[in-house]
Image (cartoon, coloured by chain):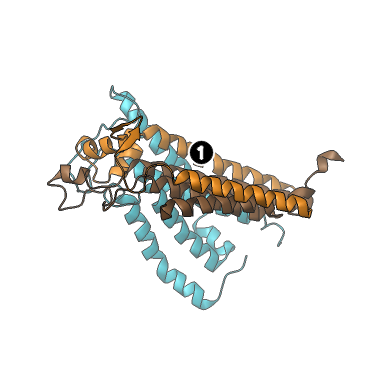
Amino acid sequence: MEKAQKAFALGIVITIGAFLILTVNSIEPFGTFPLRQIGGETENSVGQLYLENAPQQTGAANVVTSIVWGYRGYDTLGESTVLFTAVVGVMMVFRILRRNE
Amino acid sequence: MAGMTVIVRTASRLLFPFIFLFGVYVVFHGHLTPGGGFPGGVIIAASVVMLILAYGIERAQERVSFLSAEVLDTIGSATIAIIGLLGILLGTFFLQNVFSLGELGRLFSGGNFLPLYIGVGVKVAGGILLIFYAMLFASWGEKK
Amino acid sequence: MSFNYTIAMLLIALGFYCLLFKRNLIKLVIGLSVMTDGIHLFLISMGYRTGGIAPIVTGELSSNLPNFASSAVDPLPQALVLTSIVINICITALALSLSIYAYRHYGTLDPSKLRRLRE
């Protein structure tokens, strides 16, 4: 790329970085987990509900496990499908490469 | 692909059971400690890859062949599907917790979390091993 | 002006810079992976509670569960990031295998020279 294009691209990257840093520091401060200020009133998030009900409803000591397979099991099923498809895709590419030699 | 020197071969042969056992421990205690099926499967696959790198591809083919990696991947996926369909067969929803819940903190607690994590661990180990074999076989033909 | 959020956004900007300026297919894959790591760090940092513990019920906490529920960090972003890390592995594996295929076919790893369709 020429000099002008490189300077313009660098300017865009610095602008996007500054905009991201300024935006992310203007949401609520770091470390205040269950309180969200939406329109002037505070409400509890859904993670707090999972923390209160998960050890009795599912019987697992790890709350992240009971979320991954208990409350959101369909997402993990989709992720397993994505893993299977990626392995099949990699095998297809290298089988074509093997046959071309 | 040739193997490595005597020191590397001896060290990897001595270290392989411990890394394999640690991977199986992380898979089996997924509902009690951090981890679960996905990192545990990667640890198991990494131990086998360490052996393949140390001994060369020709000698590793006799022990862990290409077909066995495919079979492991398929068996893991079929376990997840069968446990999911078990919920429908017994009347309730798909992937519902139909096993007993047990008490908090023991190994056999949490319903169907343990069989599901074993299935995912086997599937991820087979998948990573299969990716490694596919990338190796593409360049194996040109050495001959 | 917190530390975690700023570093996460710096990682995203660094990955974006690598995507724009580098001329090697493998380096583009590395830049994509750095950007994804920044996004994961931001997601996990959103659920932090000051002075909180990990969301796992250990031996001495199983007797008073309401105390555990008011002193543990958010478990929901951790479950989402677990799924996202596995999908990142699949994307990296497919991108690397396609770049090997492009190298075998064209003889170069420069993305601006892969334009055989125009000839």
Vertical arrangement, residue C89 with respect to residue B112, above or below: below
- Chain with colour orange in the figure: A
The hue used for chain B is: cyan
At label 1, the amino acid type is: Val
Q: Position of residue A20 (x, y in %)?
A: 52, 45
* Outermost residue toward the right in this view: C119
Residue B85 placement, left or right of B99: right
Tell me the residue that label 1 is attached to: A82
* Outermost residue toward the front in this view: A40
* Outermost residue toward the left in this view: C63
Residue B132 visible within the image? yes
- For label 1, count other residues whose C-alpha is less than 10 Å away and answer few (under 14), some (14-19) or many (20+): some
Residue B139 placement, left or right of B83: right
Q: Position of residue C110 (x, y in %)?
A: 75, 53
Nearest to the observer: residue A47 or residue B96:
A47
The hue used for chain C is: brown
Residue B70 visible within the image? no
Q: Quadrant of residue A35?
A: top left
Count of numbered labels shown in the rendering: 1
Residue A50 placement, left or right of A12: left
Q: Residue at x 60, y 53 (%)?
A: C31
Nearest to the observer: residue A15 or residue B132:
A15
Tag 1 secondary structure = helix
Q: Position of residue A12 (x, y in %)?
A: 65, 47
For mark 1, name the chain: A
Nearest to the observer: residue C64 or residue C87:
C64
Q: Position of residue C81 (x, y in %)?
A: 42, 44
Q: Residue at x 21, y 43 (%)?
A: C69
Q: Residue at x 33, y 36 (%)?
A: A36
